[in-house]
Amino acid sequence: MRKEAITDAVLVSNYIKGDESSLEVLIKRHKQRIYSFIYSKVYDRDISEDVFQDTFIKVIKTLKKGKYNEEGKFLPWVMRIAHNLVIDHFRKNKRMPKFDNSGEFNIFSVISDSALNAEKVMVKAQVEADVRRLIEELPADQKEVLVMRMYNDMSFKEISERTGVSINTALGRMRYALINMRKVIEKHNIVLTN
């Protein structure tokens, strides 16, 4: 049977048993999706390449130690590793996506305490989900600027170049996005604290 037709789970199992070429097939099979995912977060080819390499170094170490137990869920497991490494990259560079609107509406400040307890993690995930839902309700032009600024950590100059509007227009859209989000929050009495 050709390696390309073998499932991820079997390839992982074969690699753990010593068949190095099985890992190559796994990397080739998923490289595009994993790399694209990383790039969508960091918007830099060199950093994406580094994070991609680090992801597979971690995958290899985990598999070699025999600590892999995600039966048949190889890709989601690798994506989680990649996601965590992206967060590590932002922490190291003190560039977590955040926006300080003169201190009064800073719901995006990211908790960097690595010892978050399970409840805090759940609350944080819920807050993030609520925030994303609020963002979805914004007009398209405001949503675009807000997502570029918050989640892609782009400067207003970069946003201006990407969207083809002036920096002042980008700033204005960001301001209106935050005002509109605040209105929705107040209207629905949404609590965004953790």
Image: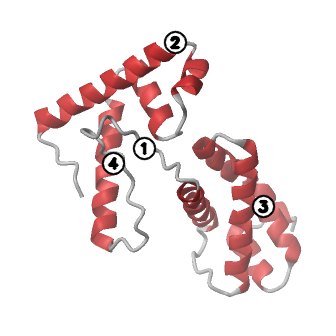
Q: CA distance from mark 2 to mark 3?
A: 41 Å
Residue 110 against residue 62 in the figure, above or below: above
Q: CA distance from mark 4 to mark 3?
A: 31 Å
Mark identifier at residue 98: 1
Residue bearing mark 4? 129
**Where on the picture, by quarter, is residue 160?**
top right
Residue 73, image x, y percentages:
59, 68
Q: CA distance from mark 2 to mark 4?
A: 30 Å
Q: CA distance from mark 1 to mark 3?
A: 32 Å
SS category of the residue bearing label 3: helix
Residue 101 against residue 115 in the figure, above or below: above
Residue bearing mark 2? 166
- Of callouts 1 and 3, which one flags the residue occurring earlier in the amino acid sequence? 3
Residue bearing mark 3? 27
Residue 98, image x, y percentages:
42, 43
Residue 4, image x, y percentages:
82, 60
Kind of residue at badge 2? Ser
SS category of the residue bearing label 4: helix
Kind of residue at badge 4? Ala
- Of callouts 2 and 3, which one flags the residue occurring earlier in the amino acid sequence? 3
**Where on the picture, by quarter, is residue 71?**
bottom right
Residue 190 placement, left or right of 21: left
- The mark closer to the camera, 2 or 3, is 2
- Of callouts 4 and 3, which one flags the residue occurring earlier in the amino acid sequence? 3
Callout 4–callout 3 Cβ contact below 8 Å: no
Q: CA distance from mark 4 to mark 1?
A: 16 Å
